[in-house]
Image: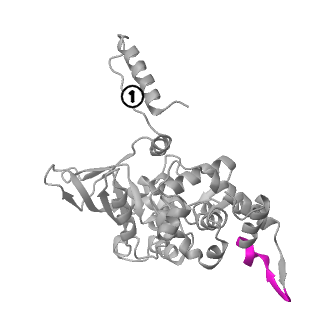
Amino acid sequence: MESASDLLGRFDTLKHLYDTVDFIEEVDIEILGVNDIVKTLRTGKNFEYVFKDIDKFEAEVDHNDESTNAVIALIPITQFYKFICLENGQINDKLFESNIRDYKGRSNVNKNIIKTLQGGNNLDFWWLNNGITITVEDIQESKTAKRIQIINPQIVNGLQTSYSIYNYYSAHIEDLENEKRKLFVKILKVKEESEGEELEIIVATNSQNEIRDKDIHANDEVQKNIEQYFKKFGKYYQRKDKYYTNRRRDKKDIVKLSEMAKYINTIFLKDPSFTRNNPGKLLSGNKYNTIFQINNLDQDYERYYLAYRIYAVVMENNKGTIFIGEDEFERANFIHHLVYATVCLFFNTIDYS
């Protein structure tokens, strides 16, 4: 395998060759690692959207360069509905990639949002709803033109409201014609490299609902890479709660983030007792970082698929009950120990590598 310096030399040679070709003015070369390439493919082209005829909004401006940092606005529900829809009428899932949750379906909260949308109340919608938080790479606003332009938006809070608006009006599209109500929207500019800042906004704006460790970790780069790796095998790694369940993927093909932590801790960290007794701690602090090698983006992701397969096979072959003395137990109570014992027996040692 060639070293990075060897490859760089080849690119330099190629660049000099192009210098002799008169119909090519300039050649620029950028060397990307695998994870940089994957990130670029995920990002895709810029997505821009313009909200028009916005009567009421306030902007926070950076006085050093006059750029807009944030906007709070009352956006017509009709425009917001169009914003979250694709040309084919489906909801634009890509707008919610940074959200730590997925749609909760017919929960009481969502039923109440639908009820509010159905009318029967003289109050405007934004009086009765917490609103939407959107992070963007850039904002351009003009009060004289009554417009707000946003670049690469992500809805980081208000997913339940967004899906409820989509579900209601896609089923009652005729109601949009007379819809005059507005939605409260916060638009915050976050630099592409400021992932910590975006996470801080996500956690703070979602604090009215319980945020679990698995929710916070759902957007970690390692988790996204595991999800991508599992698709090679027709499996769906559910890093966001209910994401693939909502999309009606077969239950047997869905692998949950919280379950994966158990698989790795038992098989690779060889600690079935901790897995059995402290499942909630597997996704906290250093334990989580160790299990998922969170700082190693170039790791071998096959380990996760192997761990899943081992568990699947052992669970399939260990259904029913087990007797310990005169007592009868469900084998599921000992599944982590059974998996560990199986792997040890396979290698004929507890010190397998």
Coordinates of residue 143 in the picture (x, y in percent): 20, 54
Tell me: residue 266, above or below residue 34: below
For residue 73, side relative to residue 244 (left or right): left
Q: How many residues crowd around disc 1 within 10 Å: few (fewer than 14), some, or many (20 or more)?
A: few
Residue 200: quadrant of the picture: bottom left
Residue located at (18% from left, 56% from top): 61
**Dot 1 corresponds to which residue?**
29
Q: Nearer the viewer, residue 14 or 140?
A: 14
Residue type (three-letter) at the residue carrying disc 1: Ile
**In the image, residue 45 lies in the stretch drawn in magenta:** no
Q: Look at the picture and state if 7 lies above or below 309.
A: above
Q: Is residue 333 magenta?
A: yes
Q: Find the residue positioned furthest to the bottom.
A: 326
Is residue 120 in view from this perspective? Answer: yes
- Specify how the rendered protein is coloured: one colour
The quarter in which the C terminus is drawn is: bottom right
Q: Give the magenta range.
A: 325-336
Q: Quadrant of residue 327?
A: bottom right
Residue found 63% across the figure and 73% down from its top = 275
- Judged left or right of residue 237, residue 179 is left
Residue 3: image x %, image y %? 49, 32
Residue 59 in picture, x, y percent from top left: 21, 59
Q: Is residue 137 left or right of residue 97?
A: left
